[in-house]
Amino acid sequence: MSLSWMAWTWPTATFFIVIALLLISMGVWEYFSPGGHPRVGILRFETTRGDRLFVSLLGSAFIHLAWLGLVGPNLWWALALSIVYAIGVFRLV
Amino acid sequence: MNKTLNNKAWFMVLPVLVLVAFSAVIPLMTVVNYSVQDTFGSNVFFWAGTEWFQEILASDRFWAAMGRNLVFSAIILAIEVPLGIFIALNMPRKGWGVPVCLVLMALPLLIPFNVVGTIWQVFGRIDIGLLGHTLAELGVNYNYVNNPVHAWVTIILMDVWHWTSLVVLLCYAGLVSIPDAYYQAAKIDGASRWAVFRYIQLPKMHRVLLIAILLRFMDSFMIYTEPFVLTGGGPGNTTTFLSIDLVKLAIGEFNLGEAAAMSIIYFLIILVMSWVFYTVMTNYGTERR
Amino acid sequence: MAVKNQTATTADRVAAGTSENASGSAKSQEELGQLMLKRGTQSRFWWLVPTIYIVFLMLPIYWLINMSFKTNGEILSTFSLWPQEPTLRNYMVIFTDPSWYSGYINSIIYVVLNTVISVSAALPAAYAFSRYRFLGDKHLFFWLLTNRMAPPAVFALPFFQLYSAFNLIDTHIAVAIAHCLFNVPLAVWILEGFMSGVPKEIDETAYIDGYSFPRFFVKIFMPLIASGIGVAAFFCFMFSWVELLLARTLTTTAAKPIAATMTRTVSASGLDWGVLAAAGVLTIIPGALVIYFVRNYIAKGFALGRV
């Protein structure tokens, strides 16, 4: 059984490792302070840490896509914007 | 129900996790890998970066297919949901009529998708189909193969035929769970038919209705087999939905990178919409309790 | 239950439809009295709407059955509402040609395999979701559901690669496992709903009585949610039976489903309308049988146990 058909590249591997690390650290955080710190933010319903991470990641994906479609292929600015957005989500939502 | 905290429950979820992860996570990772590369087959890949994404986002073909998908889902929901509620309200609640209605109405749901396509393909033909022949006799120049409008009408009619029963059965399940006492109370209050619907039946159906809308939206947004069999995406590209375009790209043109990039955009859009629906659904549930 | 808003218009009432269970009683008011009269006549025609709808559903199916009993010559030359020279030739073709009838056997094998795998994997998971809180439970549940929502077209290509790597192409188990992608989440969702309806005290009493967990689960708990298991199995059967895209991608000959056999034959041998219709009719029959057996649970099951 070979895995060559999966066509791994370093950038995509890094991407998935980062996601996996995020999930693991969320798990550890949850383990040491259970409950997920629920609160009602600007979206007017209760969210936990996990929800906020999900909203950040999904939003970042769309920020990157919008940047590609509207501005250009230099995604570092989109990444910076996504991080700002993620911080906003964790503070406000 | 107040649940106890027990992290050992993870072991009970493990089989499901392994089973679904095998079929979901590995393919999803592969799609992401493909989306940044180009290939000419035999597992030789070249780095392409974000090229495919840019190409997809700038392509009229993609946005046209996306537009068709959205219009289709909107039309489907606008027809099937009210029609489904209306039929569910008129279904018998007891007696011999109940099993007859349920069995006959559920029948289209269990027909394989491509057979549904075949049934309507035959049914709509002018020479041998009942619908096509009748319309031709009535003087309608009906032709779903060449006329885009007719193709759309036929696909929508087919989908209404295929899936309205799902909405009906869901709403019916919500309706039969209303205790008779509610109706008696309404009778004593002298409530009108509309008031009964608005204040007794609709709230009870709210949850199942959300499930119905969620399922119908998802399934109509990823429709593939039925229109593919019926029209093959034509005439021209007028009934080419995202899934059809995707399969054309991936298998027909073996354009893996572009197909993968398209898959990811498609999946992200579905993910956002599912999340919105799901959040609305679960939060509605907690507010009520 | 507050019942307000008694001044709705007639149009609203008509739009809302009628039902026998609900009726007003404000006899003194002339307008309402008239409405009741109207409703009385309407309720005698309660069967009208379901009948029209069922006729609409049955017409295309009838047409297929009609065609399956005609010869090709008759289908193409004359237009008739029922077969003029009824023939069983089309069915004979299917039942005597292994490439046709093996399609049915293949479909049934992988559908049954999938139903068994999905339900047995979903049972403990649904129990965990309905009884316990654990790390990331809500997100896990949502992640499972997203797989129900992912279009099969997205996965078709990597699926082929993945199952080739495991040497599973063209086996029944490959299709059964692939269909778990959308059937397991659905089964978990349905079973979780049914299990949440069983009071927790039953679990606790059983443990006090000295039942071990597996024994309690099989002897006490599973009979309590038997209808839920039936409904979940029904849904798994249904979605596995009707799905074609993945089934066709993962099979070539040995495990080819009947639905795929149909598409191939249509394109290859010209258009044998009679055989095509007969094959279509035969794909409807297993579904019809399954519905008949679970008819009493359908309404409940469509509510996914959570009304």
Image (tube, coloured by chain):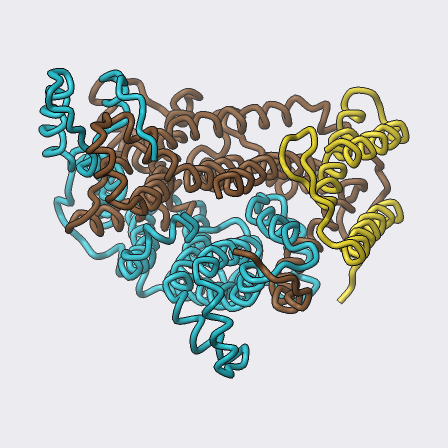
Task: Identify the chain drawn in yellow.
Answer: A
Residue C178 image-quadrant placement: bottom right
Chain C's colour is: cyan
Q: Residue at x 10, y 34 (%)?
A: C44
Q: Nearer the viewer, residue C206 or B216?
A: C206
| Residue C195 left/right relative to C121 | left
On screen, A76 above or below B282? above
On screen, C205 above or below B266? below
Q: Residue at x 48, y 26 (%)?
A: B74
Q: Residue at x 20, y 22 (%)?
A: B137
Work out whether residue A8 can be spotted. Answer: no
Chain B's colour is: brown
| Residue B256 left/right relative to B61 | right
Q: Nearer the viewer, residue C268 or B141?
A: B141
| Residue B87 left/right relative to C26 | right
Q: Position of residue C18 (x, y in %)?
A: 21, 31
On screen, C23 above or below C210? above
Q: Residue at x 46, y 36 (%)?
A: B213
Q: Position of residue A40 (x, y in %)?
A: 67, 35
